[in-house]
Image (cartoon, coloured by chain):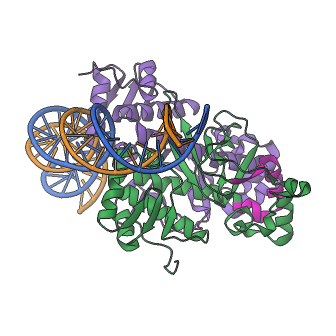
Chain colours: A green, B purple, C blue, D orange
Amino acid sequence: MLKQDLSKKYEVKCQSCSISRLCLPVMLAETDIEHLDAIVQRSRPLRKSELLFSDGEKFENVYAIRSGSLKSYTISEDGIEQITGFHLPGEIVGLDAINSGSHPSFAKALETSAICAIPFDKLEELARSMPGLQQQLFKVMSQEIREDQELMMLLNKKAADERLAAFIINLSQRFGRRGLSSSQFRLTMTRSDIGNYLGLAVETVSRLFTKFQQNELIDVNDKEVSISDAEALSSLAGTRCHFVQGEK
Amino acid sequence: MLKQDLSKKYEVKCQSCSISRLCLPVMLAETDIEHLDAIVQRSRPLRKSELLFSDGEKFENVYAIRSGSLKSYTISEDGIEQITGFHLPGEIVGLDAINSGSHPSFAKALETSAICAIPFDKLEELARSMPGLQQQLFKVMSQEIREDQELMMLLNKKAADERLAAFIINLSQRFGRRGLSSSQFRLTMTRSDIGNYLGLAVETVSRLFTKFQQNELIDVNDKEVSISDAEALSSLAGTRCHFVQGEK
DNA sequence: GAAAAGTATTGATCTGGATCAATTAAATGG
DNA sequence: CCATTTAATTGATCCAGATCAATACTTTTC
């Protein structure tokens, strides 16, 4: 590869980014996307286990995921890790830092991941002149609030198997929306991560994967999952499949 | 009271509102507050158990609480209620509806409560010309996201007594910030509401109140709570060594 | 102001999932 | 490549808190 290519290697413009329709530009006109693109900073991809930001770090950017996946988590005073979310391409990470001015959580790559850093002060300024961008920012944050409410229901009111089923269905839908198979995918997080997120012990998660397999709901081979009976899994999850079928 | 007074009865302007420093106007100049005040709609207070909005209702306003308290909650398909938050004066309710355009939750008054309705389209428009207001909106939403993360930690990783202690400490701090006593206050929600919110059975909540009283952490008389040992209660809410026995 | 409905407390019992323990499998790194 | 660490599975045991049950108290309604 030529030298000049290296410096441009990660320069996928918003205009040509494959997941822009799931990301901040979703509501923007072509010319507006260019303005957004102009403030976006791209750097070399994060490798597995590398941190995007840490608790206590000064808040300067929010981050859009272009490819790969991350987990975000907090660590309490007594050193206990709590995973607060898994993030896929098109999603915005770091919004929890706006209020205090410093990140209250960590974000770590679960696999090699390409990230766009967006300086928040510039984004705010841009949002003032671009109604569609302001709206999209409000929507993204609103959605995160709503999703946390659903998660609260999951953690407070659902049994272990319902939680795991909901988790798998949720991942499936999110993969589907990104143009990937919603019936077959690779888990980039460990069983322990899943348990941590869902408030279950690793052993319970492992046993449930085995049980789901025995009941022919899914076919699981280590990290590789394929959904055999989406209907039954959804009904166990207790969530209506609000996306009409037709995805492969 | 004279007739013309009735029509003006609830017209407490933002400029003279006692909790404006905790509400949206916090970062605004006097003239900006006037603009905000101009779009705020006030009506007769909600009485106990009246709904501010319901799941499925078209999203038009966000709401600022002037006095009283509310709970917000979702109801799953199988009819199970999940309380997602309790709201005090100065807090903004309804932000979870921005994304979908319709409310995904209910908000119900826990006592007689004065509410300001703020048309969101007008608020968005105003935010474009008022950087401080846009910033405050982002901050309020960011804070809600961060608080939900903390709650997730509480629900996933903490024992029943730690959850209730954290809940009481949290309420105490919020009352304090509103110029009320942080050591003595009235719970406006039922034991059942508290249990629902914290993922505990009513019986467990009731038993814990009794136990906290016996251990002289609090003094509780039905809805009236006074904190006797804030130090101990805080430490219970935060860190706790799982190996130490000694409680009977 | 009596009846009904909702709220709170306390005791007895039961159980889902945590914890402990052991083994196997898969990454990681020197 | 082998060695070490980390991840996953499966079995056995245990317990925090749910559930069931009974009573009392408090608020609402007619």
- In the displayed structure image, the side of residue A113 where residue A122 appears, left or right: right
Q: Does the magenta stretch include residue A128?
A: yes
Which is nearer the eye, B180 or D4? Answer: D4
Residue B120 position in % (x across, y down): 67, 61
Q: Is residue B227 visible?
A: yes
Q: Main secondary structure of the magenta part?
A: helix
Q: Is residue A188 magenta?
A: no
The mark tally for this picture is: 0
Image quadrant in which you'd find residue A23: bottom right
Image quadrant in which you'd find residue B185: top left
Q: In this view, does B201 lie above or below B4?
A: above
Q: Residue at x 29, y 66 (%)?
A: A215
Which range is magenta? A114-136
Q: Position of residue B189 (x, y in %)?
A: 39, 43
- Report the front residue among B16 and B127: B127
Q: Which residue lies furthest to the right in this view?
A: A4
Quadrant location, the N terminus of chain A:
bottom right
| Whole-percent x, y for residue B129 in the image | 83, 55
Whether residue B95 can be seen here: no
Establish if B232 lies above or below A69: above
Residue drawn at point x = 70 percent, y = 64 percent = B121
Residue closest to the eye, B129 or A214: A214
Q: In this view, does A176 lie above or below A108?
A: below
